[in-house]
């Protein structure tokens, strides 16, 4: 089938403003958007810049706006996205564009690091000397948030983040949730204090864009709601 790919291009080193690159391709309906982008880069215009690594929805590096919605290019099939023979590709919003689809992820990862994304427990190891055991029920409590691959689809689809880039964003809150509700961790209060900041969890206005955008089907808004509840009630349950 024929595909007309419209890609927002921008190289701040020599473009004054973004422009649309237009490419016509022969593709299979079952090809992924990433395949089409590779075709452009490898056969039509080698200057096209994008990030990708695993090509299987695991590394989270190829988040982009596909027909106006944040998606991983390696997880979207052309037949599911094509409209009137065309697909429109743009970089994710709210981040500085370094080149084409490549955005500056440093602020995103700074927010991630700010919530202490690691297990904190300074008590001596249990008698077996090897591991801190946890019941299946306790593990289940934060199972959903362990699925996050830090792709930024959620944060960069959030209107509160677009309005104020200092907002810590849904991805960092999901990562905080993963440790706050871990029965082995001892730094939940510290993380909750960080998230109660003016640019913390209360900037979330329950827009749900994050949940719609998450390629791992994490219930992002629900997760954020649980963190808000813990802050409101002081109870981590
Ligand atoms: Fe990506 Fe989902 Fe994690 Fe957000 S919560 S960074 S959308 S995997
Ligand atoms: Fe934003 Fe998601 Fe809240 S889109 S406003 S973080 S529910
Ligand atoms: Fe790794 Fe798409 S290339 S998630």
Image (spheres, helix red, strand yellow):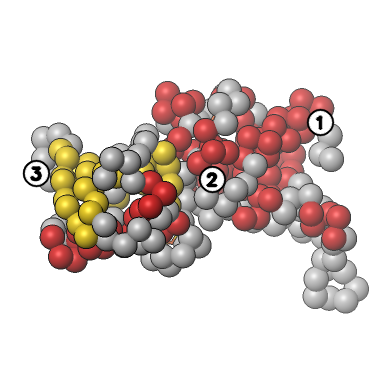
* C-alpha gap between disc 1 and disc 3: 52 Å
From the viewer's perspective, is residue 8 above or below residue 165?
below
Q: In percent of the image, x 52 and y 33: which residue is there?
A: 209
Q: Is mark 2 within 8 Å of ligand 1?
A: yes
- Nearer the observer: mark 3 or 2; the answer is 2
Q: Is residue 56 left or right of residue 82?
A: right
Residue that label 3 marks: 14
The N terminus: image quadrant: bottom left
Q: Quadrant of residue 146?
A: bottom right
Q: In percent of the image, x 83 and y 76: which residue is there?
A: 129
Q: Is residue 98 left or right of residue 129?
A: left
Few, some or many residues within 10 Å of mark 1 (<14, 14–19, 20+) = few
| Residue 108 percent location from the top left of the image | 45, 44
| Marked residue nearer the N-terminal end (1 or 3) | 3
| Residue 36 percent location from the top left of the image | 28, 58
* C-alpha gap between disc 2 and disc 1: 28 Å
Q: Is residue 106 left or right of residue 227?
A: left
Residue that label 2 marks: 214
Q: Secondary structure at mark 1?
A: loop
Q: Secondary structure at mark 2?
A: loop
- Nearer the observer: mark 2 or 1; the answer is 2
Q: How many marks?
A: 3
* C-alpha gap between disc 3 and disc 2: 34 Å
Q: Are marks 1 and 3 in contact (CB under 8 Å)?
A: no
Residue that label 1 marks: 234
- Residue 147 appears in the figure: yes
| Residue 158 percent location from the top left of the image | 48, 31
Q: Are marks 3 and 2 in contact (CB under 8 Å)?
A: no
Q: Quadrant of ligand 3?
A: bottom left
Few, some or many residues within 10 Å of mark 3 (<14, 14–19, 20+) = few
Q: Is mark 1 within 8 Å of ligand 2?
A: no
| Marked residue nearer the N-terminal end (2 or 1) | 2
């Amino acid at each position: 089938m024929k595909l007309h790919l419209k890609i927002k291009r921008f190289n701040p080193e020599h473009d004054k403003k973004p422009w649309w690159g237009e490419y016509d391709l022969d593709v299979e309906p079952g090809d992924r958007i990433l395949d089409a982008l590779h075709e452009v880069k490898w056969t039509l215009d080698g200057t096209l810049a994008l990030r990708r690594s695993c090509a299987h929805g695991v590394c989270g590096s190829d988040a982009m706006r596909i027909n106006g919605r944040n998606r991983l290019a390696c997880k979207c099939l052309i037949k599911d996205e094509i409209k009137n023979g065309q697909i429109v590709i743009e970089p994710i919003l709210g981040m500085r564009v370094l080149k084409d689809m490549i955005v500056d992820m440093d602020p995103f990862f700074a927010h991630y690091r700010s919530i202490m994304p690691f297990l904190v427990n300074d008590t001596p190891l249990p008698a077996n000397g090897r591991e801190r055991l946890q019941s299946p029920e306790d593990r289940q409590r934060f199972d959903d948030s362990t699925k996050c691959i830090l792709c930024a689809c959620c944060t960069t689809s959030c209107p509160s983040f677009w309005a104020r880039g200092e907002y810590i964003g849904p991805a960092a809150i999901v990562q905080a949730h993963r440790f706050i509700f871990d029965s082995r961790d001892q730094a939940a209060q510290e993380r909750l204090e960080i998230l109660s900041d003016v640019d913390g969890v209360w900037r979330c206005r329950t827009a749900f864009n994050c949940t719609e955008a998450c390629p791992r089907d994490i219930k992002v808004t629900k997760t954020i709601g649980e963190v808000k509840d813990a802050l409101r009630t002081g109870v981590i349950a």
